[in-house]
Image (cartoon, rainbow, N blue to C red):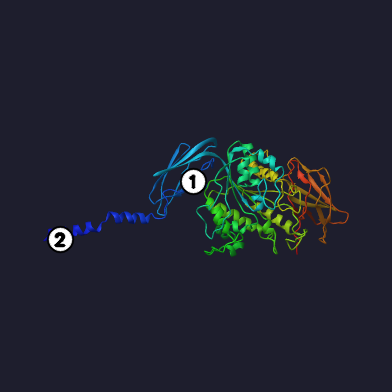
Amino acid sequence: MRKLRILLVSLTLTAGFNPARAADETAATNAGFPALQLPSFFGDNMVLQQSQRVPVWGWAKPGTEITVKFGGQARHAKAGADGRWEVRLKSLQASSQPADMVIEAGDIRTFTNVLVGEVWLCSGQSNMEKPIGKQPGQKPVFNAEQELAAADFPEIRLFKVHTALAAEPQKEIRESSGWQMCSSNSLEAIKFSAAGYFFGREIYNRLKVPVGLIESSWGGTRIEPWTPLEGFKMVPALASFAAPLPATNKLSSTTPMAIYNAMIAPLVHFTMRGALWYQGESNCMGKEPDGPVYTDKMAALVSGWRRLWGEGDFPFYYVQIAPFKYYSGNAKRVPYADALPEFWEAQTRALRIKNTGMIVTTDLVDDLKDIHPRDKQDVGKRLAFLALNKTYGQKDVVCTGPVFKKMKIKDNQAILSFDDADGGLVSKDGQPLTWFTIAGADKKFVPARVVIANNTVVVSSPDVAQPVAVRFAWSEIAQPNFANQAGLPAVPFRTDRFNVGK
């Protein structure tokens, strides 16, 4: 009888195990997981960042064993329960020798023509987005045809993220150009950023290593949509933005975080040297220009990106927006005349953020009615000067113009001293310095007489017996001639804190 019970139990247990059903259950567990998938910015022709550990990640069926081979290294991982896997390549040396990256996960994925060098992210609104050639509603950059014809740089690689929005941070880019070898055809075909390209060309020519440029930009956008939730949380003054977006299809390019979620979040952790930022025109315009708060918004953007990347305080270099008739033009885009100078001041204050740099563009505008200045060559070169000096340690490269330091009043004169007066203070055109104004206690500013003396600037006016304040380039149409010996323009400033623009 006991043997019969054991036999029945055995038969019952055997009958309960169905190999086909077990296979179905395993398949159901793995449903929705690809055999092997990597983010689209891992691909043929890419550039990997030198001198840093390089994460490589993707998705596969849970439990899949992954091997990544590159540069003599073989790194291993296993896909987790959510399908994600990641390896980190040890620090790589710059190399112009094309190599293959091989990823094994049952099947094999191979990326060819991979180089190692310097990788930079180029982001912002239309002045970063502006290509070398034609763009609807814009003029080409100066000498566009010649620039394109001379753009054969196979060791510069370009990757352009297409515009998109999302309510939550995305794992993958919705659409991109893929990595392209730089040529006149690729630059024009994908309409790559002119400022970004000219930056990359200067870096390449100076460092003689491959350069990878990732462009993620969108014309007409404000800074808030580019900022992650974590960034807003880090700045108490912006607490009102620090709430997740509702799951909705009613997003726009003005929705805070919506562009970051779709166009920056998928790039997070892809190892790069630093970021370039050319944005601000949209935040300067409107019924309430952002001058008073833009510094905080810059802090939220930079701090948020850095925290999420987890690579420390990587370099963040940006462009002070150019002179333009926001108030004095036919269509008033701002409510008062000082909106742009106040915005310049806010951008200058953002230099307090660690490991940042700013270039000035007051001398790069050919048409004050064109919000898209055509000289993007010098924009790119000046951004490159910042990187060469501050990031790559080439201290012989001058990277900024004179920066106001302090003022001393002596009799009826204001004597100003400056930092970054490399080689001495000069007038770029040999004429008297322009766009300086001076005021007494009545706060009425008048044009000033200006003389360079012993590496200081002496400012006075016969109409101001006892000066108390000086302003420089404090006008939306200011195109001054004050610079240092390297030809870099001085940063606009004011010494007062009068209640302007009201």
Q: Measure the C-alpha gap from mark 1 to mark 2.
A: 58 Å
Q: Which mark is residue 187?
A: none
User: Quick check: 44 left or right of 451?
Assistant: left
Amino acid type shown at disc 1: Pro
- Asked whether residue 398 is in view, the answer is no
Looking at this view, is 303 or 264 the one in front? 264
How crowded pointer 1 is (Cα within 10 Å; few <14, some 14-19, many 20+) is rated as: some
Residue 387 location in percent, x, y?
63, 43
Residue most extreme to the left: 1
Q: Quarter of the image containing the N terminus?
A: bottom left
Q: Position of residue 289 (x, y in %)?
A: 69, 61
Q: Is residue 246 visible?
A: yes
Q: Of the residues under marks 1 and 2, which one precedes in the sequence?
A: 2
Residue 46 as seen in the image, left or right of residue 361? left
Q: Position of residue 113 (x, y in %)?
A: 52, 38
Q: Secondary structure at mark 2?
A: helix
Which residue is nearer to you in this view: 227 or 166? 166
Q: Which residue is mark 2?
A: 5
Q: Is there CB contact under 8 Å for labels 1 and 2?
A: no
Report crowding for label 2: few under 14, some 14 to 19, many 20 or more residues within 10 A (C-alpha): few
Q: Secondary structure at mark 1?
A: strand
Which residue sits at x=61%, y=45%?
189
Q: Amino acid at mark 2?
A: Arg
Task: Tell me how many marks there are.
Answer: 2
Q: Give the quadrant of the C terminus.
A: bottom right
Closer to viewer: mark 1 or mark 2 = 2
Q: Residue 290: horizontal and vertical position, in percent?
A: 68, 60
Looking at the image, which residue is at 30% across and 56% down? Answer: 21
Picture residue at 65% right of the left edge, 56% below the top = 220
Q: Which residue is mark 1?
A: 55
Left or right: where 289 falls relative to 45: right
